[in-house]
Image (cartoon, rainbow, N blue to C red):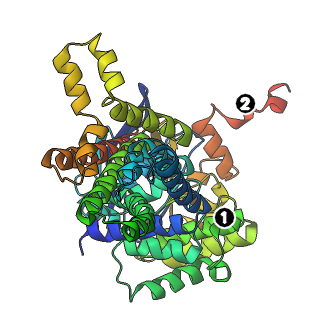
């Protein structure tokens, strides 16, 4: 179980994240959506243990992320925003570095590495320098790094950003394959991805949770079932029709 | 192995491999060797002294290190912060102290290797006359500790800023002050403005003062404890500053 309770983070006097609370059970794939600057990445960083909350707690599989950080981080795979990588390494050496830093035994590492490379379809670039890889490959190498140690919890910040439609399909299939028994939290801007991939949607705006329901229930709030319109209404304005310039002038 | 050691070993190996594949590291080593030997012969008058000793060689080490060690350490943390890989490191189930120590030890290993590569000078001189090997070995030990002290200052400076240049300038400034404080010219100038006990105290905190005993071939407890204290202080500050990034301060 992943449990956030009253999570709050303030930047320069302004609340980036304001008392966010939710729970995610194993087997759930949750889409964490919201406009830019809503507090998605800040929340994910607090869950991952790389940013300390001002208030509130994060419990991961019974471990408090901040009082028992290393134990919590050991059961988590985290794909940070922009998928940062070491350009001087190859995907193989990068994955091996992450596995060894996580204390995975030398004998187990090749199998886990091969499995992660196969799952993310980076086998053909395993021995090329990361520096020369395309954006899509880089994103997949970073994703492989998050799941290489086969963690029960995956925190993914925009996993399909920069991927072409085919690569997105592969990534979505992979997340579906990984989902049974795992907690998966995905931050994304792609609402179609949430609709097809996630069992639950959490919408955040101005640092607060605005909606927490299934994508189908979320879309049902619009008469035509358009998820983008519900997103717009809850995050940007009173109603999409009223704020549509073309329609406003008619 | 504990999380500390697995994290330490993984990052230490990664850093060494990065240096091994980086042409700048070779240029750095070559610069030190050529500059130190050139200074020893041209300015220190190694041959003209007519004595088989390496004092003329070691006396320039503090000044060379003032420039070279900040250059060696400037990328350590600033690059991680700039490229975003710091987020990946902080998400590992590894104590911050292990990360700090690993980066420091990898840089120190390179600095010590650089010193080892100057030993042909020692061997060559011993063929020409009777060299006090014990004193020379002590001077090498002192030089290693001196390099470690400058590196720890560089590491702390690197953890403050995302800019390599700014990190270099901060480390250069602090290292220069910590060295020049022991010069008679600086002491006499300071004596004009400051009380004598304070001037003497500042001079006694100089790297030059702590290195003087080692240069003469004497391991002094004061010099030894001074270098270890500077290293501990530098690494402690680095750890603190890296941890403030978890607090969203920098």
Query: What is the distance, in whole Å, between disc 2 and disc 1 at their CAs?
Result: 44 Å
Residue at the extreme left: B221
Q: Residue B52's x, y, as percent?
A: 35, 59
> Which residue is depicted at the point 65% across and 55% down?
A190
Seen from the viewer's position, the closer of residues A84 and A38 is A84
Seen from the viewer's position, the closer of residues A240 and B241 is B241
Q: Which residue is mark 2?
A: A243
Q: Nearer the viewer, mark 2 or mark 1?
A: 1
Image height check: is A166 above or below A50?
below
Q: Chain of mark 1?
A: A
- Are discs 2 and 1 less than 8 Å apart at CB? no
Image height check: is A125 above or below A240?
below
Task: Tell me the element at label 2.
Answer: helix
Image height check: is A171 above or below A83?
below
Seen from the viewer's position, the closer of residues B177 and B4 is B177
Q: Residue A248's x, y, as percent?
A: 80, 27
Q: Which residue is mark 1?
A: A131
User: Considering the image in quadrants, where does the C terminus of chain B appear?
Assistant: top left
User: Considering the image in quadrants, where does the N terminus of chain B appear?
Assistant: bottom left
Q: Residue A213's x, y, as percent?
A: 48, 54
Q: Residue A225's x, y, as percent?
A: 67, 53
Question: Is residue B110 at all visible to an observer of this figure?
Answer: yes
| Number of other residues with Cα within 10 Å of mark 1, as a class: few under 14, some 14 to 19, many 20 or more | few
Question: Is residue B249 at all visible to an observer of this figure?
Answer: no
> Which residue is depicted at the point 51% across and 41% down?
B162
């Amino acid at each position: 179980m992943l449990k956030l309770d009253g999570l709050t983070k303030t930047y320069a006097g302004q609340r980036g994240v304001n008392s966010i609370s939710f729970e995610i059970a194993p087997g759930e794939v949750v889409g964490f959506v919201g406009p830019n600057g809503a507090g998605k990445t800040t929340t994910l960083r607090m869950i991952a243990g790389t940013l300390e909350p001002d208030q509130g707690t994060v419990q991961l599989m019974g471990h408090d992320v901040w009082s028992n950080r290393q134990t919590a981080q050991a059961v988590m795979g985290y794909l940070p925003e922009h998928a940062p990588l070491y350009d001087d390494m190859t995907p193989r050496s990068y994955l091996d570095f992450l596995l060894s830093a996580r204390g995975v035994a030398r004998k187990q590492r090749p199998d886990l590495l091969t499995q992660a490379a196969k799952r993310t379809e980076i086998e053909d670039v395993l021995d090329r320098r990361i520096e020369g890889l395309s954006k899509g490959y880089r994103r997949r190498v970073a994703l492989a790094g998050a799941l290489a140690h086969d963690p029960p919890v995956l925190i993914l910040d925009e996993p399909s950003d920069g991927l072409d439609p085919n690569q997105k399909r592969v990534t979505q299939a992979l997340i579906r394959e990984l989902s049974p028994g795992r907690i998966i939290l995905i931050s994304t801007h792609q609402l179609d991805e949430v609709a097809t991939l996630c069992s639950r949607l959490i919408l955040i705006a101005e640092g607060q949770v605005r909606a927490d329901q299934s994508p189908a229930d979320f879309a049902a709030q619009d008469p035509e079932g358009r998820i983008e319109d519900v997103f717009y209404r809850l995050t940007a304005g009173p109603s999409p029709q009223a704020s549509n310039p073309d329609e406003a002038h008619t | 192995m504990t999380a500390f050691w697995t994290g330490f070993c993984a990052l230490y190996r990664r850093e060494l491999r990065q240096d091994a594949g980086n042409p700048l590291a070779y240029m750095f080593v070559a610069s030190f060797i050529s500059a130190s030997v050139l200074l020893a012969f041209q300015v220190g008058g190694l041959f003209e002294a007519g004595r088989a000793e390496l004092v003329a060689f070691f006396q320039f080490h503090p000044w060379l290190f003032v420039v070279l060690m900040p250059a060696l350490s400037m990328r350590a943390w600033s690059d991680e912060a700039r490229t975003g890989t710091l987020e990946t490191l902080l998400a590992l189930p590894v104590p911050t102290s292990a990360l700090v120590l690993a980066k420091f030890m990898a840089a120190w290993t390179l600095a010590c290797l650089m010193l080892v590569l100057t030993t042909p000078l020692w061997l060559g001189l011993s063929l020409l006359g009777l060299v006090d090997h014990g004193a020379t070995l002590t001077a090498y030990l002192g030089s290693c500790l001196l390099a470690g002290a400058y590196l720890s200052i560089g590491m702390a400076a690197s953890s403050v800023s995302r800019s390599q240049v700014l990190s270099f300038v901060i480390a250069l400034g602090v290292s220069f002050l910590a060295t020049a404080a022991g010069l008679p010219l600086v002491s006499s100038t300071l004596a004009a403005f400051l009380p004598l006990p304070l001037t003497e105290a500042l001079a006694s905190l100089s790297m030059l003062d702590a290195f003087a005993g080692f240069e003469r071939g004497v391991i002094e407890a004061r010099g030894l404890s001074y270098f270890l204290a500077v290293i501990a202080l530098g690494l402690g500050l680095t750890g603190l500053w890296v941890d403030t990034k978890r607090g969203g301060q920098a």
